[in-house]
Image: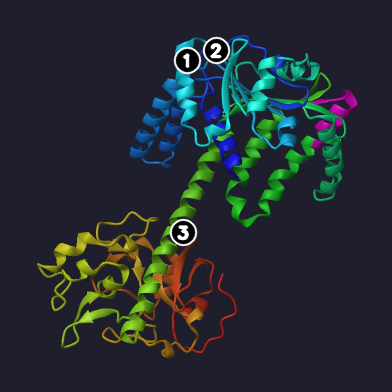
């Protein structure tokens, strides 16, 4: 596991250095043994990661502060690497896998002693670098496992036509270039494994691609994303079969994606990428070529996917908020014998402050709780000064509300779980079952309230549930009386929603979408 993490970090460093300084004419072949099956060439500067940061910022996936911090960090690291690395070569051999040293050999053309010192200092800070060795030889700096470094320095590798051809298939302008030259054993394993995939996709036989595969050359830019893939087949007939296989795969991909409910929002974007890929798909020199130069469809997909991931993360944060609130309700029940009443009331029963103030001691906010005057209303001269100190647990990351506003409300009104302002609810009063009764709900932005104000959602009012559903985009999070939190889709039946908003209606609830 330790070595796997180190390999991942080495690969990440390699990706980070892909670049813009004119490359030297370097032939790595003499330093690679006959069992090398992957060769990677990376050049600093050709991938300007600050453009990626600017793109994410423009799509509001990250804010300006995050963009500035990321840009500064990338610029600082990249400046040091650009100065010392014109290009980097990485080779992976099956000998390393067999010997228990599954790490690549990294080769950097030597410039001068200052460069050597700088790279040793940089690589020395990589966790686990004590497992690796750096040495000089033949105008190269070698970094990797000791046995691999020794073999590379000796430079006994023979000319390999397959590797040379794979390298020639690259787009020389791309920053990252990869040659995959499977050994005979790897080809045989691939051919044996391919039939297990047959039949999973109607009308497609993976053998059409793998049966006479010889090698593959891939070159690409990370941002904006561009790529060229060349898959060498044994002859023109095999290349045509591979082309047909790829065309079928591209045709069916959007259709299969459309069957996944969580992926339907991106089907259109994937379809545009497929259309662009088809334009660059052809047979050439007994091989299958797939080239994609227009990156806009991919950028659109990245933007949409990142947006969905961000929304999902925010939804999870809101669910966590509701879990903390639910836990506070149960702790209140354990300590005082019931769930908190919807409001802290005066002696004559007048609502003064919300339950959100009442449970402050149970969400680690006792100091804030003690600053309230519990015998004064929420908007008294004293208490209203505390409105802007709303705890983070009441802030829904999905919404941009005014300071001091929250959309976490409890169901009130005649027949609701919290029907009486001044009385709490005991668990044994929830006769419909705690797993079938909503305790706290995430309401639409237009229903948000000041967190200290004794105001919630009167669910039994005329048209209350219909108005609630109309204000939603897709659905809402709800905390149930058993402490669980569930995301409920907007498509929920009105009768079902009304049923789970009452604690003792006696309704039969079969399914909550």
Q: Which comes sooner in the sequence, label 2 or label 3?
A: 2
**Residue sitting at x 63%, y 10%:** 138
Q: Is residue 388 left or right of residue 61?
A: left
Give the SS element for disc 2: loop
Residue hosting label 3: 316
**Residue sitting at x 16%, y 76%:** 374
State the image coordinates of residue 154 (x, y, percent, origin top left). Answer: 69, 15
159 versus 490 height, above or below? above
Magenta residues, as a range? 230-245
Question: Alpha-carbon distance for marks 2 and 1?
Answer: 7 Å
Give the SS element for disc 3: helix
CB atoms of marks 2 and 1 within 8 Å: yes
Q: Which comes sooner in the sequence, label 2 or label 1?
A: 2
User: In front of the other: label 1 or label 3?
Assistant: 1
Q: Quadrant of the C terminus?
A: bottom right
Q: Quadrant of residue 155?
A: top right
93 versus 431 height, above or below? above
Residue hosting label 1: 115
Residue hosting label 2: 110
Foreground residue, 399 or 315?
315
Question: Alpha-carbon distance for marks 1 and 3?
Answer: 47 Å
State the image coordinates of residue 65 (x, y, percent, origin top left). Answer: 33, 38
Question: Alpha-carbon distance for marks 2 and 3?
Answer: 49 Å
Number of residues whose C-alpha sits closer than 10 Å to that of mark 2, classed few (under 14), some (14–19) or many (20 or more): some
State the image coordinates of residue 427 (x, y, percent, origin top left). Answer: 42, 86
């Amino acid at each position: 596991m330790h070595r796997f993490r180190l390999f991942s970090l080495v690969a990440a460093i390699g990706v980070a250095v892909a670049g813009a300084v004119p490359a030297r004419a370097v032939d790595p072949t003499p330093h690679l043994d006959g069992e090398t099956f992957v060769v990677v060439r990376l050049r600093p500067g050709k991938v300007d990661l600050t453009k990626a940061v600017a793109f994410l910022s423009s799509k509001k996936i990250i804010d300006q502060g995050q963009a500035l911090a990321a840009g500064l960090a990338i610029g600082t690291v990249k400046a040091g690497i650009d100065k010392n690395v014109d290009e980097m070569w990485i080779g992976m051999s099956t000998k390393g896998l067999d010997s228990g040293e599954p790490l690549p050999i990294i080769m950097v053309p030597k410039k001068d002693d200052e460069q050597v010192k700088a790279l040793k200092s940089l690589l020395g800070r990589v966790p686990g670098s004590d497992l690796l060795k750096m040495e000089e030889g033949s105008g190269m700096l070698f970094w990797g496992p000791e046995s691999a470094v020794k073999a590379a320095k000796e430079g006994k590798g023979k000319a390999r036509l397959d590797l040379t051809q794979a390298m020639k298939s690259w787009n020389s302008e791309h920053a990252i270039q990869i040659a995959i030259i499977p050994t005979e054993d790897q080809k045989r394993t691939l051919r044996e494994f391919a039939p297990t995939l047959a039949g999973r996709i109607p009308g497609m036989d993976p053998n059409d691609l793998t049966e006479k595969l010889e090698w593959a050359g891939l070159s690409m830019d990370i941002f904006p994303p561009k790529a060229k893939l060349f898959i060498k087949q044994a002859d023109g007939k095999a290349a045509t079969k591979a082309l047909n296989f790829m065309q079928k795969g591209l045709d069916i991909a959007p259709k299969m994606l459309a069957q996944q409910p969580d992926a339907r929002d991106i089907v259109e974007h994937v379809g545009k990428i497929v259309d662009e890929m088809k334009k660059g798909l052809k047979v050439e020199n007994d091989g299958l070529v797939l080239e994609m130069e227009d990156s806009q469809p991919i950028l659109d997909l990245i933007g949409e996917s990142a947006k969905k991931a961000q929304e999902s993360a925010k939804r999870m944060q809101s669910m966590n908020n509701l879990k903390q609130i639910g836990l506070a309700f149960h702790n209140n029940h354990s300590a005082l014998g019931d769930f908190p009443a919807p409001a802290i009331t005066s002696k004559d029963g007048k609502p003064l402050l919300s339950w959100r103030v009442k449970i402050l001691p149970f969400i680690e906010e006792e100091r804030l709780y003690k600053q309230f005057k519990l015998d004064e209303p929420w908007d008294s001269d004293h208490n209203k000064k505390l409105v802007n100190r709303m705890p983070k647990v009441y802030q829904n990351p999905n919404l941009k509300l005014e300071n001091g506003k929250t959309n976490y409300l409890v169901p009130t009104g005649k027949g609701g779980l919290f029907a009486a302002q001044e009385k709490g609810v005991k668990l044994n009063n929830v006769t419909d079952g705690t797993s079938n009764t909503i305790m706290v709900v995430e309401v639409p932005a237009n229903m948000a309230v000041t967190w200290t104000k004794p105001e919630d959602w009167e669910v039994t009012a005329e048209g209350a549930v219909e108005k609630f559903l109309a204000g939603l985009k897709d659905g809402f999070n709800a905390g149930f009386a058993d402490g669980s939190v569930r995301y409920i889709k907007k498509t929920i039946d009105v009768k079902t929603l009304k049923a789970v908003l009452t604690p003792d209606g006696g309704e039969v609830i079969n399914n909550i979408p």
